[in-house]
Image (cartoon, helix red, strand yellow):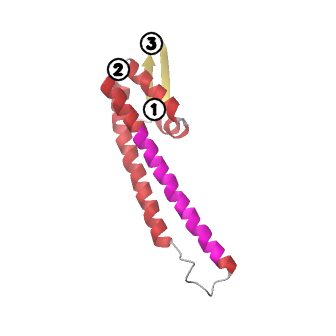
Amino acid sequence: MAEQVTVLVERCTMQIFLDPFFESSTQSNIKRMLRYVFQEPWRNEETIAVLGAYFPQKISEAKAHWAAASKKCQDDYVCTNLHYEWTAQQKHHAECGNKRRLAEVKSCKRKYERWLKISADYKDLKQKA
């Protein structure tokens, strides 16, 4: 898959590296770039095709990461309520591990939902074009 696409708009040419752009840009900047792509769809046919294959792949990857993180969180969860023999430090260490794994699950879910929003914006603009 191409890691770089070219967006042509009037007298402007943009070279965009997909992964860094979509991971670090804000939602509004991504939407603006997609509007530029569909402003002149006949000049950006290759970019539209690349993005059409790119978004479903990223959504499936994000969903797989989310499922893996969720499974790891469930498997590695340590219930501290039933361990009366543990010291306060041991309980704290176990609770911190639980919180860290839960934060990872939430982060993966956020990334998955972000890819869904980006893909929805792409599909809306594609229908309007």
Does the stretch in magenta take in 106? yes
Q: Nearer the viewer, mark 1 or mark 2?
A: 2
- Of labels 3 and 1, earlier in sequence is 1
Q: Going 43% across and 19% down the picture, which residue do you hit?
A: 8
Q: Are marks 1 and 2 in contact (CB under 8 Å)?
A: no
Image spot of residue 21 (x, y percent): 51, 35
The residue that disc 1 covers is 4
Relative vertical location of residue 119 with respect to residue 73 in this rendering, above or below = above
Closer-to-camera residue (46/24): 24
User: Which amino acid is tagged 3?
Assistant: Glu
- Of labels 1 and 2, earlier in sequence is 1
Mark number displayed over residue 10: 3
The quadrant in which residue 4 appears is: top left
User: Which amino acid is tagged 2?
Assistant: Pro
The answer to whether residue 57 is seen in the rendering is yes
For this orientation, the residue located farthest to the front is 81
Closer-to-camera residue (22/113): 113
The residue that disc 2 covers is 41
SS class of the residue under badge 3? loop
SS class of the residue under badge 2? loop
Magenta segment boundaries in residue numbering: 91-117
